[in-house]
Amino acid sequence: MDRLALGTLGQHLQRLRQEKGLSLSQLAAAAGIAKSNLSRLEQGNGNPTLDTIWRLAVQLNEPFGTLVAPISVPLGEDGVQVRLIDQGQETPQVDAYWMRCAPHTTRHAEPHTPGTQESLTVISGELEAGPEGETTRLKAGDSLAFPADRPHCYRTGERWATLLLTIVYAEGGATP
């Protein structure tokens, strides 16, 4: 993530934290990260992982898309890039993402809030995806929907995979 995107994310994160009435210490402890790391992140420094951003969104009771909405560049780490395409304003909350995974990449995702569903469509390449222990092999043109309120993963083989990912949050709980 470039310096401008980090600064934008940090300011947005700080504003959301303050609106929720949380101190740095409270949010850091709830998200399982060091207070100093959260402070650096809010100042536009550091290099947050996707998991860190997800955990912060969960603790702020905000969809991941709300936290990253001001950022126009893809977020990425360890062979995975994710970019918010659009965020619905209806109920239930729906976020749409573009995702690209490098060859021989496994991305383990933490569970989202109860009732959250994910659906994905593979645009190019091949991918194994779904709840841990129950993944499905997909190729270009294939789609899959699964409950995302339990640990799940995305795993590529020999080639890059590009997909569209939609997250539908349970009604009354538009949280990640």
Image (cartoon, rainbow, N blue to C red):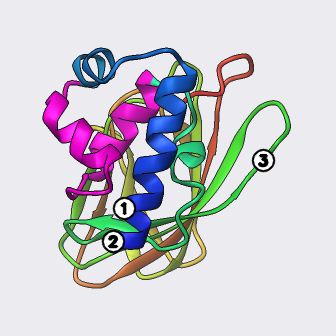
Q: Earlier in the sequence, mark 1 or mark 3?
A: 1
- According to the picture, the residue beneath numbered tag 1 turns out to be 6
Residue at 85% across / 37% down in the picture? 90
Residue at far right of view? 90
Segment tinted magenta in the rendering: 32-59
- According to the picture, the residue beneath numbered tag 3 turns out to be 88
Magenta span dominant secondary structure: helix
Residue at 45% across / 34% down in the picture? 57
Residue at 51% across / 53% down in the picture? 68
**Amino acid type of disc 2?**
Arg
Q: Earlier in the sequence, mark 3 or mark 2?
A: 2
Q: Residues within 10 Å of mark 3 (few under 14, many from 20)?
A: few
Residue at far front of view? 43
Q: Name the secondary structure under disc 2.
A: helix
Residue 127, horizontal then vertical, whole percent: 37, 67
Please say if 142 is above or below 115.
below
**Amino acid type of disc 3?**
Gly
